[in-house]
Amino acid sequence: MRYLARRIVLMFVALVIICTATFFLMRLLPGSPFNDEKLSNEARAQLEAKYGLDKPLGVQYATYVSNLARGDLGNSFYFEGRPVLEIILARLPISAFLSAQAVLFGLVAGLVLGVVAALRHNSVWDSVTTVLAIVGISVPSFVLGPLLQYWVGVKLGWLPIAFFESWAHSILPSLALSVFVIATVARFIGSEMLEVLGQDYIALARSKGLSRLAVVVRHVLRNALIPLVTVLFPLTVFLVTGSLVVEQIFAIPGIGEQFIRAIVVSDYFMIMGTTIFFSVLFMLMLLLQDIIYGVIDPRMRLPGKTE
Amino acid sequence: MEPQRRELAPELFEPVGSSTPDSNEVAGLSIGLWQDSWRRLKRNRGALTGLVVILVLMVLAAIGPLVSPHTPYEQDLSSQFVGPSSQHWFGTDDFGRDMWTRVWAGTRISLYIAFLAALLDIIVGVSYGASSGLLGGRIDEVMQRGIEILNGIPTLIVVVLAMLVLKPGILTISIALGINGWTYMALITRSRILQLKGQEFALASRSLGAGRIRLLTKHLLPNSLGPLIVQLMLTIPAAIFFEAFLSFISLGIQVPDASLGSLINDGYRELRFHPYLLWFPAAILSLLMICFNLLGDGLRDALDPRMRG
């Protein structure tokens, strides 16, 4: 409990640092959101006044923080002053859907590959999985995306390659994201299962007459799945990073695509809002991972882990 | 069954004595840690292949642009989008620039940034971790909290923000990658130092009058090299990936320079009609990542004492 409280405090400190750093870094940016040559000086001054950019930096910061505390992330410059939070929430379901689909597919495929590889150790399947795992972990999604687009989309013409209009549109981007998930899960489950298979209690379960299948499902898998929780956080990080490029490649109106556009047009509040959103997401996942791990595996109860 | 009884005659025994002439002789060849690790690595086919391919790619990145009559920047608008041919081995891009030289010059920049970032990681991480572990007490406590906070901030966010502000270039990209990349290096160094500094050889060195610096550089760090090398090998592919990622979302290397990431971005734009522009840099990037990961895995198995059977 004390550990948890300390973790949350540290998380909060990190979050404050992120918000503050983002705020001041944005003001250091070369270029302004209203750098349009067609704008007269008065018009620019008016725009800056509208968004409070004419006030001293300290005042701007104070306003931003107090708004933040009330859940107001400010307004986007680019989308005619729509609230940042509203834009993020509108785009969230699309990104979340793609990621969820990628994780689901990745988990199932990775689990099957990992289990087969471990049960048929040193067979062809094992080698195939090993190769697939290392390729899947190494090849970046911005290489996989275009690869799928070209071969499945353009050459074979099976699936649409851009935009987000139907479920069919979501298959290729999800696939591009899921390869990493498959690889991570397969590798992880494979090595965990090998370790569990060597334990005495597995021999006991076999010798008391349980069938091979029952042993695998009830004893091996259950114990091999526990450490899978530790990939939860790296996976989230990957999915967010991946969504930035995959959404860009497949022209999908999700958060990642929005973030990159905000960077290109120096949409201050949009960049800050998305940054804070991603940071909170990462931190929550990290915390969740630790809590789940502590709950399901008593050997890992946290206080003993400190030193 | 009755166990067979054996008669033990006193003649069967003879005293060894304390100093026979060859009592100091070592039976068999003595193998140091590094030789042993090298043997293990050599037995790992994947890691060895990885190492060889990386070396070949490095040589190509170094001499590739020199063996072609073209330069990476020379534009020739009369020969845009020429497919791979004997003139242009990897074809030409939208400005008629030779892709063979551009791709290898890009590989060079990608590798350069990755190694520079890894170097920064190891310098900052090892000094931070070593001071933290060696000084101990309150200072250690404070320094560890610092790392915990930094670790809470996602790399992606830090790198993107840093690149927004810094002027993109080889050095700034490496710095951006290093901002919180060093924390794992620091954690590993610290835990090794804590583990080693209480051991007898450290005590012996101290009682012979060695100061902290000598103790650290002569005894503690050389004994921590294994885990640090493994971590370094994981840092390099991560740095290659992040550099390519940044360049792909156009926050990295700026025109007219190119890295593998920016070449992939350019190629991807022409994917439909000139896919070869994408395939070459994409294949090299993927190959580099795969080989570094293979080598890293192999080194971990070879150097990690816990993996010894």
Image (cartoon, rainbow, N blue to C red):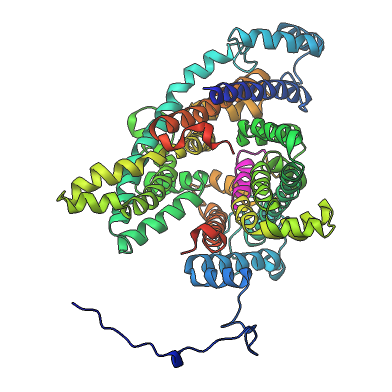
Relative placement, left or right, of A62 versus A219 is right
Q: Nearer the viewer, residue A138 or A220?
A: A220
Relative placement, left or right, of A13 versus A8 is right
Q: Nearer the viewer, residue B62 or A112?
A: A112
| Vertical position of residue A86 compared to residue B224: above or below | above
| Vertical position of residue B222 compared to residue A268: above or below | below
Region rendered in magenta: B237-251
Residue B302 occupies quadrant: bottom right
Residue B124 horizontal/vertical position (percent)? 75, 45
| Vertical position of residue A32 compared to residue B261: above or below | above
- Asked whether B250 falls inside the magenta stretch, the response is yes
Q: What residue is rendered at 79% in x and 55% in y?
A: B206
Q: From this viewpoint, is residue A163 visible? A: no
Residue B88 horizontal/vertical position (percent)? 61, 64
Q: From this viewpoint, is residue B1 visible? A: yes
Q: Residue furthest bottom?
A: B11
Q: Residue furthest front?
A: B10
Relative placement, left or right, of B287 versus B19 is left
